[in-house]
Image: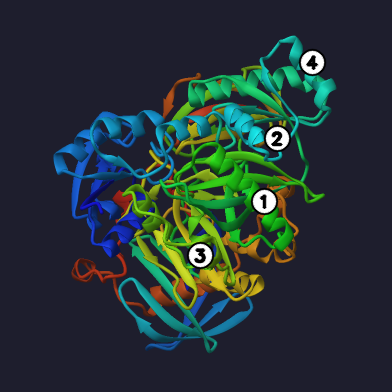
């Protein structure tokens, strides 16, 4: 087993990996950019190395700096988390060249997964269902117009190197195709340095269902059931759950079989996810392989009782899977909500600022994965996700109610966030009835944004504090409690931001 | 004690009666009794007409922030003069809501726009944010071009309202 693991990431996922390492008796090395000097993962790791200025390409994406940090600290493995370098085959190769184990699949598997067109071909060849597609097309080409005849409308333009909704365009009318192709190519070039796009038949009102895979380096592969991630906003997942409310035993067998077929076809090892689109007629189609830990992995951990990060580390260390397929039992239902620093009342624009005070929810079946602490800085350099709230209960509706209570108990004084929006989603009839699809939030648009519910209560408390609360004094300000740094100074407020904080 | 709190520019009149720990708070037509359970420098629990409410707060000379029930509110103690000159139905000025990079500018001086028309795309925190016109009118000034880095509050586009 490894003695020391370097975590090439930040935020809640770096903290998550540190927890797993600690429990396994492995010491940890954090890397951090200058923006993250005081970040929680740096506070928690046994050692830490600064790797550059705030922009990710000069720090968390700088392969050479991370490899030399691993070398200097004598780390024998690197956990990449998700995002950043986690799916980067050049990074996996650089680790191998430096004699450090990359905790993830092989560079070859990363390459095959990263190219959506190639992954599609491999999946189809292995026998997994795929949507009709034109795999090679460019704007202005003759195939483009032909595609409308071959595939029919509506169509989806997707980037071969894509992810996160970038380089994706919906085409509903034939005359929209040229502009959509050009826009997708431009966006894909800007985001991935690779402008290749392909066309796929669009399924309206699809659900997103994905299968968690664990595979060791000795040819043993199991699945840990499915997750449903149908509540998305602009192709970004917001709410995930396990199991899916609409997947019965028969469908589960089919879709997990298909996922294992894909995993075998790309010679998968470590933890990974095979994503599928589930059509309203209950047919399903391969979407892509996510060759890494997923943001939403906790819901699977809650219903299976299996620690995915510890499994990743064991597999990377060459151990055989100790879990057999028949050992995997799904218990109850888990829901995860992603908390973002964004303002739902202002077009969901991402927000920066200081976390002045925070109080995390707790209670039976509640888990919070976060890197939040009073004093943490939310900067514009990275993804605005602040935390994940996970609720686990005996059945879906109990988990939903538990989540609502947890979201109401989550208190943050800091930049605007989407907690009230998440609560509203949990209370939505469509979510309660599991009548959801990936287009629901975008389709409903602004009518999902409701007014705050506790403004009067907050005003009453504020007035009470002003009339009868403790006086703010310099002495009291110095004696800050463990919960928070209460005396916010006006100097900490950025010009132009203060007026917008709610 | 009469107080005027401003939330997002809107005034809320509140009156607090009594002395000591237990107070009556009047907000609009409602009278509410607030009894403290615990109160520290940054958090507390009070009973509001008997119902417990746990909250966090932060206080400075002219502002109180309260987080309760999963929501966070900032109350200014004096009216803050809005930097935006709000038109009849929205704001003619589009300012950078956060620091970021301008990816694309679709607004052109002289062109007519309707509410919701995209003006430019600002990239920040790995997200592309489409900034749209809030009012109907004619684009008067465009202050940025693609590739520019902007600071929060910077005026990006000015629209002359339709008469």
Residue A499 shows in this picture: yes
Above-or-below relation of A341 to A65: below
**Residue displayed at 41% across by 26% down:** B149
Disc 4 chain ID: A
Q: CA distance from mark 1 to mark 2?
A: 45 Å
Q: Which residue is mark 4?
A: A145
Q: Which mark is residue A334?
A: none
Picture coordinates of residue A283 (x, y %)? 77, 47
**Residue displayed at 60% across by 44% down:** A261
Q: Look at the numbered disc 1 and give the secondary structure of its residue.
A: helix
Q: Which mark is residue A390?
A: 3
Q: CA distance from mark 1 to mark 3?
A: 24 Å
Disc 3 chain ID: A
Q: Residues within 10 Å of mark 1 (few under 14, many from 20)?
A: many
Q: Is residue A336 left or right of residue A77?
A: right
Q: Which residue is mark 1?
A: A255
Q: Which mark is residue B115?
A: 2
């Amino acid at each position: 087993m490894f003695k020391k693991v370097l975590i090439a990431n930040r935020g809640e996922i770096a903290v998550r990996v540190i927890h797993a390492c600690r429990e396994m008796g492995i010491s940890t090395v954090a890397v951090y950019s200058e923006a993250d000097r005081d970040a929680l993962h740096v506070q928690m790791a046994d050692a830490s190395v600064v790797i550059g200025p705030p922009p990710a390409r000069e720090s968390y994406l700088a392969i050479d700096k991370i490899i030399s940090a691993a070398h200097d600290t004598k780390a024998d493995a690197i956990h990449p988390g998700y995002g950043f370098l986690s799916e980067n085959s050049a990074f996996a190769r650089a680790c191998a060249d430096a004699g450090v184990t990359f905790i993830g699949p092989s560079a070859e598997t990363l390459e095959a997964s990263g190219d959506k067109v190639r992954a599609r071909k491999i999946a189809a060849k292995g026998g997994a269902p795929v949507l009709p597609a034109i795999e090679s097309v460019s704007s202005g080409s003759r195939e483009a117009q032909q595609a409308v005849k071959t595939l029919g409308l509506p169509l989806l333009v997707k980037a071969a190197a894509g992810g996160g909704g970038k380089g994706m365009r919906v085409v509903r009318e034939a005359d929209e195709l040229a502009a959509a192709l050009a826009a997708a190519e431009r966006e894909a070039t800007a985001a991935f340095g690779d402008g290749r796009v392909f066309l796929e038949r669009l399924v309206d009102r699809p659900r997103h269902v994905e299968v968690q895979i664990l595979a060791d380096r000795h040819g043993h592969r199991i699945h840990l059931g499915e997750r449903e991630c149908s509540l998305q906003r602009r192709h970004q997942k917001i709410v995930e759950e396990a199991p899916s409310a609409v997947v019965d035993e028969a469908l589960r067998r089919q879709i997990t079989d298909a996922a294992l077929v894909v995993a075998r076809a790309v010679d998968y090892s470590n933890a990974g996810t095979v994503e599928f689109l589930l059509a309203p007629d209950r047919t399903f189609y391969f979407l892509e392989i996510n060759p890494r830990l997923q943001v939403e992995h906790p819901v699977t951990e809650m219903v299976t009782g299996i620690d995915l990060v510890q499994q990743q580390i064991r597999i990377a260390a060459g151990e055989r899977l100790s879990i057999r397929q028949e050992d995997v039992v799904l218990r109850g239902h888990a829901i995860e909500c992603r908390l973002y620093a964004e303002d739902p009342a202002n077009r969901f624009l991402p927000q920066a600022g200081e976390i002045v005070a925070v109080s995390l929810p707790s209670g039976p079946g509640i888990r919070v994965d976060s890197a939040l602490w009073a004093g943490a800085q939310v900067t514009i350099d990275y993804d605005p996700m602040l935390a994940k709230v996970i609720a686990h209960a005996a059945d879906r509706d109990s988990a939903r109610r538990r989540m609502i209570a947890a979201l109401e108990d989550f208190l943050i004084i800091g930049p605007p966030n989407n907690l009230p929006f998440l609560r509203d989603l949990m209370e939505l009839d469509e979510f309660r009835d599991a009548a959801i699809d990936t287009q629901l939030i975008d389709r409903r648009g602004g009518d999902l944004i409701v007014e705050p519910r506790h403004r009067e209560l907050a005003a009453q408390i504020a007035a009470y504090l002003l009339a009868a609360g403790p006086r703010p004094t310099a002495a009291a300000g110095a004696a800050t409690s463990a919960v928070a740094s209460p005396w916010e100074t006006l100097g900490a407020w950025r010009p132009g931001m203060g007026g917008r904080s709610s | 004690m009469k107080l005027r709190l401003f939330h997002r520019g809107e005034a809320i009149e509140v009156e607090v009666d009594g002395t000591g720990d237990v107070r009556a708070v009047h907000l609009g037509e409602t009278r509410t009794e607030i009894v403290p359970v615990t109160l520290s420098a940054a958090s507390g629990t009070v009973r509001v007409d008997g119902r417990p409410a746990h909250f966090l707060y932060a206080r400075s000379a002219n502002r109180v922030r309260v987080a309760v029930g999963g929501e966070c509110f900032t109350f200014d103690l004096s009216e803050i003069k809005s930097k935006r000159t709000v038109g009849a139905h929205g704001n003619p000025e589009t300012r950078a809501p956060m620091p970021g990079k301008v990816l694309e500018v679709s607004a052109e001086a002289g062109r007519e726009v309707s509410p919701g028309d995209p003006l430019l795309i600002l990239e920040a925190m790995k997200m592309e944010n489409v900034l749209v016109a809030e009012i109907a009118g004619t684009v008067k000034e465009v202050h940025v071009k693609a590739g520019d880095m902007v600071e929060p509050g910077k005026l990006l586009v000015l629209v002359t309202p339709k008469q």
